[in-house]
Amino acid sequence: MTLLIRLAKVGRMPHPRASVVASVDLLVCDRCGLCLPLCPPEAIHLALDELVVDRHACTGCRKCIAPCPVGALAMVPA
Ligand code: SF4
Ligand code: SF4
């Protein structure tokens, strides 16, 4: 498990505790930024005005899902 956690931290595979990860529908997301500070591992980023969820950092906690005002985030298999 130690090796799995180490590989997850460097982004080579999904987080070992996550069976599902967050995914954003960019056609729905309005780039409001509300979800960014809600993510404990800071897995959500705005890059070049596009929201990006780092599936390798996402722990699957779901804290970002309900607060999204337009329902752009959903959980998908890791
Ligand atoms: S809260 Fe929803 S609409 Fe706002 S940036 Fe996040 S995913 Fe996009
Ligand atoms: S499910 Fe949790 S860890 Fe993953 S992007 Fe949303 S808030 Fe961050």
Image: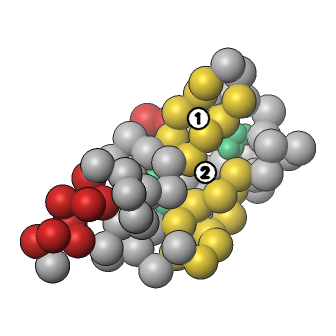
Q: Classify 10 Å Cα crowding around label 2: few (below 14), some (14-19), many (20 and above).
A: few
Residue beneath the point at 40% across and 74% down: 18
Identify the residue at the far top of this view: 48
Which x, y percent locates residue 75? 62, 69
Which x, y percent locates residue 14? 42, 66
Residue beneath the point at 61% across and 24% down: 47
Which x, y percent locates residue 26? 80, 43
Q: Nearer the viewer, residue 45 or 10?
A: 10
Total count of labels: 2
Residue beneath the point at 53% across and 66% down: 21
Apparent side of residue 1 relative to residue 17 in the rendered image (left or right): left
Identify the residue at the far right of this view: 27
Apparent side of residue 51 relative to residue 20 in the rendered image (left or right): right
Mark 2 in CB contact with mark 1 (< 8 angstroms): yes
* Residue 42, visible in the rendered structure: yes
Apparent side of residue 30 relative to residue 24 in the rendered image (left or right): right
Ligand 1 is located in which of the four quadrants?
top right
- Assess mark 2: CB under 8 A from ligand 1? yes
Q: Earlier in the sequence, mark 2 or mark 1?
A: 1
Residue 7 lies in quadrant? bottom left
Give SS at disc 2. loop
Q: Nearer the viewer, residue 52 or 73?
A: 52
> Which amino acid type corresponds to the residue marked 2 in the rendered image?
Pro
Distance of label 2 from label 1 (alpha carbons): 8 Å
Residue assigned mark 2 = 67
- Assess mark 1: CB under 8 A from ligand 1? yes
Residue beneath the point at 88% across and 44% down: 27
Residue 8 lies in quadrant? bottom left
Residue assigned mark 1 = 34
Q: Which mark is residue 78?
A: none
Q: Nearer the viewer, residue 34 or 18?
A: 18
